[in-house]
Structure formats: C-alpha cells, structure tokens
Image (cartoon, helix red, strand yellow):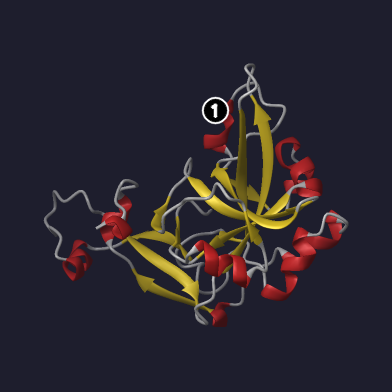
C-alpha cells in the first residue's frame, strides 16, 4: 500500500536526475503530504521523448463509465497487474515513474509519542497513529513504478491519471505494512520506460527495494490530516 508520499524535490532537479524534458504547463509546488486525487509530476516516455508531465493520482481506465474509479485505483499489485483489466493495457503501453522524496506508513503507538511534536497526549486526542517517513539513504529521489492512462468524458474533457505499483515489504517496511511501493533502481529506469520492452520481462524489476538502502524516521503526526501541508507553513 502506498497512500501518501512526499515530493519536495524541485521539478528542474527531477528533470536532470531522470534525464527528462519538462512539459511547459507544469506548475506544481513542493508537497510533503501528497495524497490521492492530487496532481503530481510524473516521468513518461512516448513519441515526444522522455518528459515530466502532470498526472492525477488515482487511475481511471480509458474504458471507464465515469471518473469515480480513480479513488479506488491508487495502487496496483505488481504480481497481478498484467492480469487485471484496469492495469493490463497501461502495463504494456503506458508505464511511468512517480518521483518521490519518500513515502509514509502509519503505526498505532502510545500517545506519549506525540509529545515529540508538542501535541496533546490525552486519551481524547484524535492523534492515535504515528506516521513514519521512508526515504533513500543516498538522498536521491525514489523512482516509484507506476502505470498511467487517459480517459475522456462525454463532452470530450480529458484527464490523465496514474496508479503506483506495490510489492512485498522489505525488512524495514514490514513492521509497518504488508505492502510497499515498487521502487526502481536507477539503472532500471530506462528499461521500465521503454515501450519496446516485453512487459513480462519487466516483472523482476518490481521487487522489494533493498532494506540497507532505505532509512526510516518518525514524522509529524499532523500528517494524519491530508489537508496538513508542511511546505505551506
């Protein structure tokens, strides 16, 4: 499961790191609390070359009757994505990378942990879960493996959306959740984005990221609220 992540790396730095151009309409501020339904910079590769463009989080398959399916398809299990109607064609033709500074998972813990952030530790406190932030030890952006699609409504209005692939957790993440996002090694980025690659041959790339390369730290419990955005403070 990956239901919240951070992306505070500037788009220009992402373009350099992923060797991509940037669509001119991109104007997305840094966010430390990215939630489903938000617009996100994503790396794709098509006839225009490799570029960063804006996609909305929550996949809406091109054949959907309406856009409401997006709220249910924020993640896709890597093991079965090629078999599922919603993900099968995007896996074959529209793979993408979702850059992330890191991702969050939550754990139920005693109220005294909120003291670290000066929050109310009383029994009636609404802050019951402690978020943890996972990021790469080398400080580089994570390359989350994703799938994207285009959908049009009856009036011709088009939206472009994505889902994040997930896999079994590594030793660091498994204490917090039974799934984790598929994080691609930097040397695998070209293979993942290449439309000519056989999708079945890409499945081994969707493995648990090495635990030695991931760090985890306690995060601000106010992140429990999707409206809380540290970058805007």
Residue 105 is left or right of residue 162, and the answer is left
| Relative image position of residue 159 (x, y in whole percent) | 60, 34
The reply to whether residue 165 is visible in this rendering is no
Q: Residue furthest top?
A: 154
Q: Quadrant of residue 61?
A: top right
* Nearest the eye: 197 or 47: 47
Residue at (11, 56) in percent of width and height: 122
Residue at (20, 48) in percent of width and height: 126
Residue 109 is left or right of residue 179, and the answer is left
| Relative image position of residue 152 (x, y in whole percent) | 66, 26
Circle 1 residues within 10 Å: few <14, some 14–19, many ≥20: few
| Relative image position of residue 158 (x, y in whole percent) | 63, 30
Q: Quadrant of residue 62?
A: top right
- Position of residue 83 relative to residue 52, above or below, is above
Residue 4 is left or right of residue 48, and the answer is left
The reply to whether residue 196 is visible in this rendering is yes
Q: Residue furthest front?
A: 24
Secondary structure at badge 1 equals helix
* Nearest the eye: 206 or 29: 29
* Nearest the eye: 129 or 58: 58
Residue at (56, 66) in percent of width and height: 14
Return the residue at label 1.
68
């Amino acid at each position: 499961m990956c239901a919240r992540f951070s992306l505070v790396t500037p788009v220009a730095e992402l373009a350099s790191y992923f060797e991509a151009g940037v669509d001119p309409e991109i104007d997305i501020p840094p966010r430390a609390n990215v939630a489903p339904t938000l617009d996100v910079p994503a790396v794709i590769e098509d006839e225009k070359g490799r570029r960063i463009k804006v996609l909305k989080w929550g996949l809406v398959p091109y054949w959907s009757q309406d856009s409401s399916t997006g709220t249910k398809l924020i993640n896709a299990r890597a093991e079965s994505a090629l078999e599922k109607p919603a993900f099968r064609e995007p896996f074959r033709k529209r793979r993408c990378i979702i850059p992330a500074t890191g991702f969050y998972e939550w754990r139920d813990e005693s109220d005294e942990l909120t003291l670290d952030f000066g929050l109310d530790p009383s029994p009636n406190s609404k802050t019951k879960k402690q978020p943890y932030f996972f990021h790469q030890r080398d400080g580089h952006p994570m390359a989350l493996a994703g799938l994207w699609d285009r959908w049009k409504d009856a009036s011709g209005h088009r939206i472009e959306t994505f889902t994040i692939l997930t896999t079994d957790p590594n030793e660091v993440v498994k204490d917090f959740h039974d799934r984790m996002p598929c994080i691609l090694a930097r040397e695998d980025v070209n293979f993942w984005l290449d439309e000519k690659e056989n999708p079945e041959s890409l499945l081994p790339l969707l493995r648990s990221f090495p635990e030695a390369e991931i760090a985890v730290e306690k995060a601000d419990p106010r992140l429990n609220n999707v409206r809380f955005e540290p970058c805007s403070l």
